[in-house]
Image: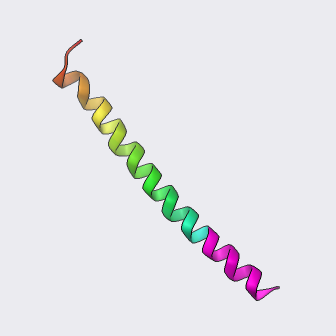
Amino acid sequence: MDTELFVEATIINVSFLRWQKKSSLFKLSLGFYVGKEPKFYPS
């Protein structure tokens, strides 16, 4: 197995996982605000 390729793939995976975590945190907080909104502004 090529070590350089393995290292590159690992770096890509780590940065992707970090981005995924940030993105899911953002979706969670967005869903939280959207879910809260009707209580503040009754339609």
- Residue 20 in the image: state x and y as whole percent: 51, 56
The color scheme shown is rainbow
Q: Is residue 15 above or below residue 21?
A: below
10 relative position to 40: left or right: right
For the view shown, which residue lies furthest in the right direction?
Answer: 1
Name the residue: 75% across, 88% down. 3
For the view shown, which residue lies furthest in the top direction?
Answer: 43
Residue in the foreground of this view, choosing between 15 and 28: 15
Q: Quadrant of the C terminus?
A: top left
Name the residue: 69% across, 77% down. 8
- Residue 38 in the image: state x and y as whole percent: 24, 22
- Residue 39 in the image: state x and y as whole percent: 19, 23
Q: Is residue 39 above or below residue 8?
A: above
Residue 2 figure quarter:
bottom right
The total number of labels drawn is 0
Name the residue: 54% across, 63% down. 17
- Residue 41 in the image: state x and y as whole percent: 19, 20
Is 8 included in the stretch rendered in magenta? yes
Is 19 included in the stretch rendered in magenta? no
Q: Quadrant of the N terminus?
A: bottom right
For the view shown, which residue lies furthest in the left direction?
Answer: 40
What's drawn in magenta, residue-wise?
1-12
20 relative position to 11: left or right: left
Name the residue: 37% across, 44% down. 28
Is the magenta region chiefly helix, strand or loop? helix
37 relative position to 1: left or right: left
